[in-house]
Image (spheres, rainbow, N blue to C red):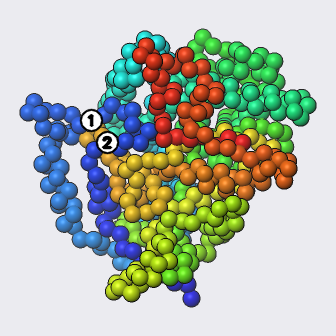
């Protein structure tokens, strides 16, 4: 019989307010110039004019509420995120799902998901001329003013606190996109010479945001490599219908000819079912941080894994519980990780054997280790690349470390929302679906091994295909960017100095 371990969650609204004060420092929001407003007495206030004391009184009242009014005898239906997308227009009750389905549904459900209604991407009204700025601080001050103006406009129009976030593609446009294009062109020319291939350049991009990167890459190739541009094609795969429409509108930019060799495909990469036989480049910039993870814990004695489920009760309460691993994707990921060549991977979730043996002699010793978030959807993405894009080259970038992550777990995400004009990180992923961004750091060294294993990349002698490599944002920029275009008068350079917590995986 499968073992089952319950962890009863606190009241949902308590989860939402179980957040630490202050702004997160991660790169996704680190350049955000947001702060609580001030009244004439210099005291912090929220956007509705209520004072901090009133807010704290509200929180105390919430914390006094009973833990739950749910009836555990009501049957719970096991569902997936895909089923929720079809069946529900508001967060369901009396359901149970794997953690990855709970997170995926919270982020991507077309009716109530975070990316369907909350998230907006900051894009400067015009490109910054970096040589006009004294230094990076001067640039941040200017960008912060524009950022706050746009954020205030959004809140005034919609009367709800929308989350606005930015990417290097947007704030460093077009030069960041040009550096990606330069890398692709160099690799394409090298491959064409080595393989003596006359096949055209083909690019697939996943999760293109506003479509800015697509336009910048196409502009660069059209202006600098017209012969390659004349036969190339660009395909943007976008799960969000709203963003797909925005990306299509990018084609009709005022004063510039549209790129007729680009198309937008409105579907999830996990629904992709067309095999692409020709060589291609696959671009994924700041996408996998929002790929849902599963949660596992390990038996304290033997180290056997247990998978986590989230149960949603009839009153909206959450409960996390564990069973021995039976999900095929979780089992396959753990098996692939265990079979990696080279030094074996030892999860930090499992303490050393000596510690476990001593700890077991004390009363109230745990039967499970602390939780570990495992990147099952990223693993699934690698499988899609291997199956449907067998001759691809990967250009992937994302966060390798983040502050303000959920405490007490390995590879935990940042869970945050806006409150009182500030981004507020929370201490759990069990929060109201649709109102919180959930994003994860990536262990790039482990991802490289998983990617090479799944996509059969390794030494040229063994597989005929060279393995992937990991580099930092600074290293990539030095190799591919025109750094003179983003240098300030002091010599500081946002292309090199910003987003230091991001890395690239290149194949």
86 above or below 208?
Answer: below
Q: Residue at x 30, y 54 (%)?
A: 19
Quarter of the C terminus within the rendering: top right
Q: CA distance from mark 1 to mark 2?
A: 8 Å
**Residue 8: which numbered mark, if any?**
none
204 above or below 215?
Answer: below
Where in the figure is residue 314, as x and y percent of width and height? 39, 70
Q: Is residue 120 left or right of residue 362?
A: right
Where in the figure is residue 143, as x and y percent of width and height? 39, 23
Q: Nearer the viewer, residue 92 or 341?
A: 341
Q: Are marks 1 and 2 in contact (CB under 8 Å)?
A: yes
Q: Nearer the viewer, residue 241 or 460?
A: 460
Other residues around mark 1 within 10 Å, as few (<14) / some (14–19) / many (≥20)? some
Q: Nearer the viewer, residue 106 or 330?
A: 330
129 above or below 41?
Answer: above
Q: Name the residue furthest front.
A: 354
Where in the figure is residue 136, as x and y percent of width and height? 40, 23
**Residue 35: which numbered mark, if any?**
1
Q: Secondary structure at mark 1?
A: loop
Q: Residue at x 52, y 40 (%)?
A: 502
Q: Secondary structure at mark 2?
A: loop
Quarter of the N terminus within the rendering: bottom right
Residue carrying label 2: 23
Q: Is residue 102 visible?
A: no
Q: Earlier in the sequence, mark 1 or mark 2?
A: 2
Q: Name the residue furthest left.
A: 41
Other residues around mark 2 within 10 Å, as few (<14) / some (14–19) / many (≥20)? some
Q: Is residue 422 visible?
A: yes
- Image quadrant in which you'd find residue 179: top right
Q: Name the residue furthest right.
A: 196
- Image quadrant in which you'd find residue 398: top right
Q: Is residue 253 left or right of residue 317?
A: right
């Amino acid at each position: 019989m499968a073992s089952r371990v319950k962890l009863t969650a606190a009241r949902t609204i308590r989860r939402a307010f179980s957040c630490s004060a202050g702004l997160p420092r991660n790169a996704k929001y680190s350049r955000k110039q947001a702060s609580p407003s001030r009244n004439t007495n210099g005291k912090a206030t929220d956007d509705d004019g209520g004072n901090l004391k009133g807010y704290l009184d509200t929180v105390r009242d919430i914390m006094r509420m009973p833990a739950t009014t749910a009836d555990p005898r009501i049957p719970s239906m096991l569902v997936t995120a895909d089923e929720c997308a079809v069946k529900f227009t508001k967060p369901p009750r009396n359901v149970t799902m794997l953690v990855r389905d709970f997170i995926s549904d919270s982020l991507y459900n077309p009716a109530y998901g975070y990316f369907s209604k909350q998230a907006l991407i900051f894009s400067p009204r015009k490109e910054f001329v970096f040589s006009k700025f004294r230094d990076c601080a001067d640039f941040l001050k200017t960008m912060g003013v524009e950022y706050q103006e746009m954020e205030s406009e959004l809140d005034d129009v919609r009367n709800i606190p929308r989350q606005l976030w930015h990417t290097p593609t947007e704030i460093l446009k077009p030069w960041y996109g040009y550096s990606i294009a330069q890398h692709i062109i160099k690799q394409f020319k090298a491959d064409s010479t080595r393989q003596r291939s006359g096949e055209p350049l083909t690019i697939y991009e996943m999760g293109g945001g506003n479509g800015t990167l697509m336009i910048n890459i196409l502009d660069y190739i059209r202006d600098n490599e017209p012969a390659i541009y004349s036969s190339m094609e660009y395909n943007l795969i976008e799960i969000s219908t709203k963003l797909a429409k925005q990306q299509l509108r990018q084609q009709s930019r005022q004063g510039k000819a549209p790129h007729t060799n680009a198309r937008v495909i409105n579907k999830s990469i996990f629904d992709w079912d067309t095999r692409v036989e020709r060589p291609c480049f696959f671009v994924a910039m700041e996408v996998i941080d929002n790929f849902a993870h599963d949660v596992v814990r390990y038996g304290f004695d033997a180290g056997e894994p247990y998978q986590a489920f989230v149960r949603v009760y009839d009153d909206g309460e959450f409960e996390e519980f564990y069973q021995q691993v039976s999900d095929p994707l979780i089992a396959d990921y753990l098996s692939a990780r265990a079979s990696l060549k080279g030094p074996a991977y030892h999860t930090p979730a499992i303490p050393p054997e000596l510690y476990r043996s001593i700890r077991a002699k004390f009363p109230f010793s745990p039967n499970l280790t602390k939780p570990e978030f495992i990147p099952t959807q990223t693993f699934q993405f690698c499988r899609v690349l291997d199956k449907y894009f067998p001759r691809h080259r990967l250009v992937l970038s994302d966060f390798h470390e983040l502050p303000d992550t959920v405490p007490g777990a390995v590879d935990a995400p940042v869970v945050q929302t806006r409150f009182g004009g500030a981004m507020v990180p929370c201490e759990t992923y069990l929060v109201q679906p649709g109102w919180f961004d959930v994003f994860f750091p990536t262990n790039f060294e482990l991802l490289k091994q998983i990617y090479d294993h799944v996509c059969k990349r390794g030494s040229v002698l063994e597989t005929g295909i060279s393995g992937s490599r990991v580099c930092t944002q600074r290293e990539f920029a030095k190799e591919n960017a025109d750094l003179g275009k983003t240098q300030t008068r002091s010599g500081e350079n946002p292309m090199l100095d910003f987003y230091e917590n991001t890395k690239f995986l290149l194949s």
